[in-house]
Amino acid sequence: MHKNIGTPKLVKRIFFDFKWFLESLWQLFISLKLTFILLLIIAIGAVIGMCFDQTLGYEEFFRRSGQGETLKEIFIFFEVFDAFHSWWFSLCVFLLSANLIACSIEKLPRIYLEAKRPRPYLTARRFLGLNIKKVILAQSNDEANEIINGFFSGLRPKILNYNGQKYWFFKKADFARYGVYVVHTSLLIIMFSSIYATQRGIDGDLMLEEGTKSRFVSAKGLGGLRFKYDLGFFVGCDDFRLKTFVDDSPMEYESDLYIANASAREIFRKTVRVNDPLSYMGFTFYQASFKPIISEKLIMLKITEGDRATIHRTKLNDSIILPSGSNIMATKIYEDFAGLGQAVRILEKTANREETYFHIFRRYPDFDKTVRRAAYSVVFVDTDQTYVTGLSVGFIPGISIIFGGFLLLLVGLFMCFFLNPMRLFATTFADGNKWVIYLAAQGIGRNQEFVKQFFKERCEKTTISKENYE
Amino acid sequence: MNSSVFYNLSTAGYIVTLAAYCYHLIQSKKELLRFSILVMAFSFLIQTWGMFLRWLEAGYIEVAAFEKAIGHALSGWSFFVVFTEHPPWSNLYEIMIYMSWGIVLVTMFLEIKWQLRWVRELGLFLALLSLGVASLTDSSIKPLVPALKSWWIMIHVVSASIAYASGAIASIICLLALMRDTERITLKSFASFGLFAMGILLFLLAGGFRLVTDQAYLVKLLARAGEQIVNVVDLSEGGSQKPYSVPMPLVGWLFLLVCGAHFLGGIIILKNEKWLLITFKICFFLSLITFAFVLGHDLLKTKITLPAHMSHHLVPRGDWFIGFKSHSWSFSLLLIAIVIEAFLLLFLNNPELVRHRLPSTKHLELSAYKIITLAFFLMTVVLITGALWAHYAWGRYWAWDPKETGALAIWLNYGIYLHARRTSGLSGPVSSLIGIMGFFVIIVGFLGVNLGLFADGLHTYGNS
């Protein structure tokens, strides 16, 4: 385009010939080569970022890697500990979107005009402009019509009259010409809404002990730095349940969550499971993990004295004082006591400091009442391990726009790859005592070969044993 | 009958097909081809039936475990949900079998559509290799972890496997397109570039820069624990329980020699075309020797003794040795590299043998393009379903987790390919090269965690 000129001259030219500069810049941004290079850098960047642990954050990353000073400087410059939010990655993504927008602006009007006004008449000029074409000779008008009908067999072309001349025109899946734009638009939507979501969104964790509530979330900020985020309302967990398989691997776990407003009044509740979150005010709470609190196993005992029954939740070695003055204390839990199932050993201290042990079984609630026959009876109802439920807290503004972008992307790709827009043209002229048939087809860049093949097959089918004009 | 019986039957069928295909290369008879296609289709059906059986087997196990946990029998819709929630692609063994299924599916599709020589042979080789890797992994069925209990797993994994399979097949076609291209590519540049590429590949396989600094090809140490063969675990690092690696005797030096020879050979061919064939043969011979050494160590289960100060914190104790299990991934990749190099040598030795009966370059490039559009579309589906699933399960639609980023890299690679095809000057051999690159990006993305290239993130279930 322009000759290679020295740097001072280039600077001078940019300064004085601003229009030229803008023009060159525009040319740069509408070139596919730029797309190619940027995509290559992003792909390589993705692979490099993959090789470094991105979850550590700045300090942890350098504490673990223990690099030399020079390498550390390079790592810091390229921000490899947070590669996907680094300046160079963001720059490439930004340039790519500029590239995309420029390309669309440059090419969309032409495609729009082309799709809007198909120019169905196969005039001589049009015929020259198309590159999939054929000319066939026929002996009479009827034969010519027959050949053209054969060419369009099963397709239902439009038959148009223009200046006393008859034209055949057929188009298929014309809207698929916009496929590329749908794809690129959806990518832009996804990119920008994702950037917006990362800037404005909250990505945090909340560890909630059973029976507590909290309004602060530990959120992850730039560079992996954590900060406390105030939700403005309370999230509480009443109960956490873990169902396990026989080998104790987790089968399913769920938490009973409730939301309470700033003055601690409960608003609504929901049980969340893996793959089934709770949403409130744009925040979504996901069941992500759990952690047992060691030595916090609760035992539920039902104590009946006379006709009064009370339920106690007690920890191991916590004593329960009974109205009669004696106190009892669970000292041990057996997961399986001599084949009789779960059992608890109870230590009874009477008022005059006599100590006796007895066992109660979960499977046999009447055991204590019938066997010991004391002034009171104890029933072992249940055990309950106390857990901390691990919730992921996400606030992603515009997530529905991102998902809409995904849908649009799929639609666009389908239009691009699985639909074949195609136009077929035909007309016939009298030339002396013969009739000349002009046939032509038009595809778009990517499906040119397909249309060519289709056209060839159609021509061969209709014109076996017909001589070619050219 | 058990699903593994059907898997073994189908493996045997694929081996017969591959042998018949190879024989067909020498003696092209129509009946032979027809026979091998029939055997392949039949084995494919057997494998599909095996997968179906495996689904049922897993279903019974899931139901039994569930019923035991909740204490009463399931019925109706809840039975159906629990019974079907464990599809036969939820752990590494199943994924590898499923990958081979996908590769055979794509190969058969191409057989019907274009009947390309070499594609079916190399495709079947990849399928068999994937079955071989599966046989080294744990085939037992365990109940699914909660995060995998989602309908997304169906569409997510199904499209991933077919996308990877079609990407791998497309890269074979791209290689053939380069070989067929007599106008734009000289044998000299092909051979030289091939040697450089193989050199880099072998260098990365042998451990990258570690090879230069330590001259060692590291593999995991194994020991017997009763009937089973297990990794030896190093308990010294504060109980981090990492498998302990040892250098394979002599192989590190051999790899260094091989890589050096490849780079030197590339330069020699560039300088003087006369020595093209002999240089390539020497390089191939050296790689073959290295491979033979590796294979020998694995087959003979070479015993390893370590000095006492290094070994006192290794568990289990006893006779330590190395075998296929100590580097199953790099071994299969090494096998792939050797087969690629053998194929390149076969081509350079007699180009017409490979080009014989191949369609034109343009046709091959177009075929590759069509398959890559399919792979690209399916990769998009994989990324989108992955993002949706992650959003509903973990609350993050995108977390730059290594496996996610790997899938993005594959997608970007094919995006680059599609744009290169539309750019003047890049639409020919350059785009074919990008297509071939796709294969390696797929391996990095798909197996990176297993190869130890990066720490595993959220996709740990698939890597047991």
Image (cartoon, grey):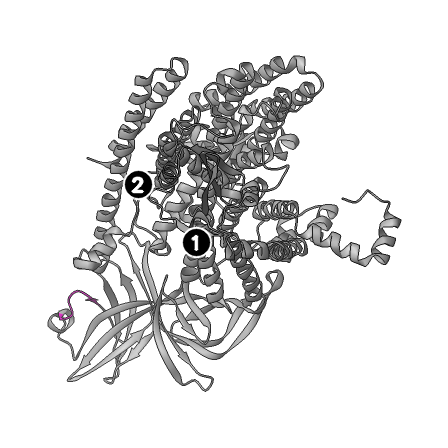
**Quadrant location of residue A149?**
top left
Disc 2 residue crowd, few under 14, some 14–19, many 20+, Cα 10 Å: few
**Which one is in front, B33 or A342?**
B33
* Residue hosting label 1: B386
Task: Choose the circle earlier in sequence order: 2 or 1.
Answer: 2
Residue A314 lies in the magenta-colored region = no
Q: Which of label 2 and label 1 is nearer to you?
A: 1
Chief secondary structure of the magenta portion: loop
Name the amino acid, label 2.
Ser
Residue A290 appears in the rendering: no
> Taking A384 as reference, is B333 left or right?
right
Q: What element carries label 1?
A: helix
- Distance (Cα) linking label 2 and label 1: 26 Å
Examine the rendered structure and indicate whether residue B128 appears above or below residue A65: above
**Which residue is tagged 2?**
B140
Residue A334 lies, with reference to residue B226, above or below; the image says below
Residue A459 location (% of width, % of height): 41, 34
Q: Which amino acid does label 1 sit on?
A: Gly
Report the front residue among B196 and A295.
Answer: B196
Q: What stretch is highlighted in magenta?
A: A359-366
Residue at 48%, 23% in the rendered image? B339
Residue found at x 75% / y 57%? A22
* Residue visible at 25% across and 51% down in the picture: B84
